[in-house]
Image (tube, grey):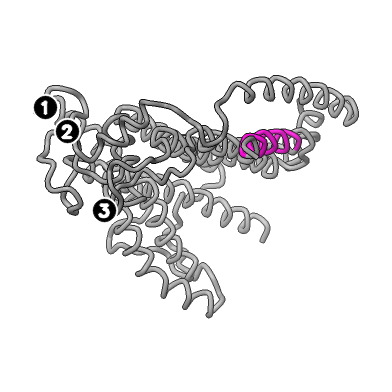
Amino acid sequence: MSFLPYGVAAWLFVIGLYGIVTSRNLVHLIICLAVVQSSTYVLLLAVGYRSGGTAAIFADISTSKVTVDPIVATLTLTDVVVEATVVALLLALAVQAHRRFGTLDPNEMGALRG
Amino acid sequence: MSERARMAVFGAGVLGFAAVLVWGLGGLPDFGDFAGRYGDYLAHTSVPQRHATSAISVTTFDFRGVDTLIEEFILFTAAVGVVALLRTGRERDDVAAEPESVRRPTAQSGSLGSVATALVGPGLVLGINVVLHGHLTPGGGFQGGVVLMSAFLLIYLGGCHIRLGRLRPLAAMEASEGVGAAGFALIGLGGLVIAGAYLENFLPFGRVGNLVSGGDIPLLNIAVGLEVMGALLVVLGEFLDQRLLMRKGEA
């Protein structure tokens, strides 16, 4: 059982990649990329987990308690922000592509006007 | 490349990748056995040293403050990039990013309108609460900024354009984004001038658990909250305008 979170991270990564490769729509492709990125959250949080540890927030617990690693939590926060910005930029590019090619299917885009 | 060839290449690649991944993951400590001393150190020094109870906020805004500054600028730059991308090619259509004359309702459903309107106030209060308590409990500028952004979007969902007196909402959001980004950098400069190092805490730490504690961490949270809210609203506003434009094109 102790490898399950790592397995989930790997699965999310691969299934997202599969979605990207088979995608027929740029918006779908961008969401698949978001799935790939979400595997990194699972991996980061899984790496920093400690059995019996609580969140590293001492509002109502003693400061000597075992906590999970706060660094991976902050890294995940950074990761989420980066993902949001990447998705926003890619969606804007998809809008531009649709304007130019009149389609969102990546297969037809190259063939039409290379 | 044909569909088949592509799947073959993908299959071969993914098998190789899976092998490397399993090899790499095998070297990690077992789930739950992580022994990073650095994280432990940060978790257990944030209350005595910074008088703030959320070790995650302390790590984000103090120990890793410069990182967060850069992260904030990533968001800022991306928002500017989205605006630039969506506005280019629009001058041809001769439509302003924000139509002034069109003030027709944005939604027709009455029930959606009342639910959305009823949720605006609680959303704003919750967002401000999450931002202000970032150094005490889970939350902070990034999370609270997103909640605030949703509260503003509810106004749009409820069927009205956001009105801020004479201020144009998009301009106000751009200002909020800029003020947030600049505020973070300026608070950092304050640390440089007063305490001798960039982003060094220069305010009194206060009592542990109070709303005003943790030195400049609450201020940084507010700056980030403004920035995140502004940046996301600018981006979403541009996308919504885009949709209105497309609808206009179809009509």
**Mark closest to the chain's N terminus, 3 or 1:** 3
Q: Between B111 and B132, which is closer to the camera in this rendering?
A: B132
- Residue A55 lies, in percent from the top left, at 40, 46
The verdict on residue A9 being magenta is yes
Above or below, comparing residue A61 to residue B1 in the picture:
below
Give, as a three-letter code, the residue at label 3.
Leu
Main SS, magenta residues? helix
Image quarter where the N terminus of chain B lies is top right
Give, as a three-letter code, the residue at label 2.
Asn
Q: CA distance from mark 2 to mark 1?
A: 7 Å
Q: Is disc 3 in contact with disc 1, using a CB cutoff of under 8 Å? A: no
Circle 3 packing at 10 Å, graded few (<14), some (14-19), many (20+), is many
The residue to which callout 1 is attached is: B195
- Residue A5 lies, in percent from the top left, at 61, 39
Q: Secondary structure at mark 2?
A: loop
The verdict on residue B188 being magenta is no
Report the span colored magenta: A5-18
Residue A103 visible, this angle: no
Q: Residue at x 49, y 50 (%)?
A: B236
The residue to which callout 3 is attached is: B132
Q: Give the letter of the chain under mark 2.
A: B
Above or below, comparing residue A111 to residue B138 in the picture:
above
